[in-house]
Amino acid sequence: MVQPFNTDEANGARPMAGPPIPTAPPMDSGEGTDSQHVNFLVLGNKENYDVRADRKAILDSNTGLAQMLSGGDGGKCVVRDVNPVTFECFVRYLETKYIKFPSTSHMLEMLVLAVRFQCPQLEIHCVKELDLSLDVSNVLDVYRALWFYNSITPAKVPPSQPKRRSRCPRAHKSSSGQTSIGPVTPEEHFAALLTNCLQLIDMQTEQVFAQEAMLSLRFPELEMIVRRDALQMSSEAVLIDLLARWSLEDCKRKHIDPTAENRRRALGALCYTPRYLTMARREFDAARERIEMLDPAELQLVGDALGGLSRAANANLTPEQQALVARFRAPRPDFPQLPVHLSTRSHPRNYPKRMRKAAAEAERALREGPKKSCCNRFLLNCCSVFACIFD
């Protein structure tokens, strides 16, 4: 238990007339209670705390605490800028290899300590527990916490194993050699958890976008989310409404007038992330009244396209305008990609069969290129036959 460390001499002991007589063996003798334990002095704002731990367990952990203990005087180690209760939980994990997480915030605190004191086993354990408890209510907390690790980017979903095994041993050997074993290092687990956070946001876009925590995201954090291709929304108006609210909140944070120009400047290229041409004309006009995220020329371009732009007028567009129209017209996929399997929550069997099939087809198209139709294959075969006949 964490105990306040009291440095007062008023502890009820009588002053001794002479020098104290040692009753314990020396520290370097390896015997006695002092050689079996170590005290960590946790410095707090108002009072200090003393955490007692098993010396051998700390040294065998091969963590930052073991290095601190090896490089110190061996009697007492000073630890700063930590929560005493959380730090004692970390020490008990090093002793028992067991930990119980009461909440998501506690998992995130333990993850910070595991990274700080270089404990990869606890890092991976925290990531798996966070993935297991991931839902709409805490996904933004986990997502923002992962931004603490600046080098993390979403992981690539590993290729799934084939449903049926080939009877040919050679084919089975070649396919088994290409199968990914999933994340191994703590860095790979962090990237996989970030991927799963974004995948959950894709699936529950409208519920996540309605949270007030979305308005407090920094621009890079918001950009990674709204640029996602597989956001599942009933209408692009949901994304437009989020960008409108975030730009207004950003102007308040910067203490500038929330004019249309300032709000467009705050969003930058994010103004072009909604698929405007997938909306009905009535939806677009209603969204246009709330905020003008496009300049007058771009609004005219979208309005003409929604009204049925003629082929002659379309030919007069610049290459940049044609690319913009194509971007606004691109439909979103019916299903997002599957998450990386980190826990029972993210196991593929917990997702609909149609979603698994769509993810497998997208993965196959990415690996092998677009699938050729039966007619194309028939024509190619006929051409090959005639080429052989007239050769």
Image (spheres, grey):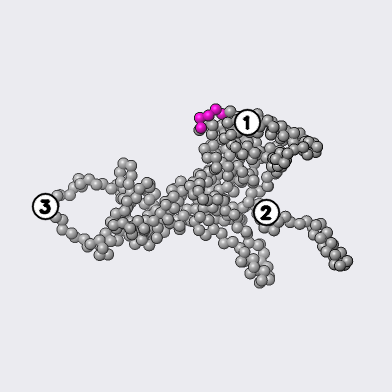
Secondary structure of the residue carrying numbered label 2: helix
> In the picture shown, does residue 73 fall above or below 136?
below
Q: Quadrant of residue 207?
A: top right
Q: Is residue 55 left or right of residue 13?
A: right
Residue assigned mark 1: 291
Q: Is residue 325 visible?
A: no
All told, the count of numbered labels is 3
Identify the residue at image location x=80%, y=37%.
Answer: 312
Closer to the eye: label 1 or 2:
1
* CA separation in Å, label 3 and label 1: 84 Å
Q: Position of residue 370 (x, y in %)?
A: 72, 55
Q: Amino acid under label 2? A: Ala
CA–CA distance between discs 1 and 2? 35 Å
> Which residue bears the numbered disc 2?
362
Local crowd size for mark 2, using a 10 Å CA cut-off: few (<14), some (14–19), many (≥20)? some
Labels 3 and 2: the sequence-earlier one: 3
Start and end of the magenta stretch?
A: 254-258
Residue 390, by quadrant, is bottom right
| Rendering coords of residue 367 (x, y %) | 67, 58
Examine the structure image and report whether residue 372 is included in the region drawn in magenta.
Answer: no
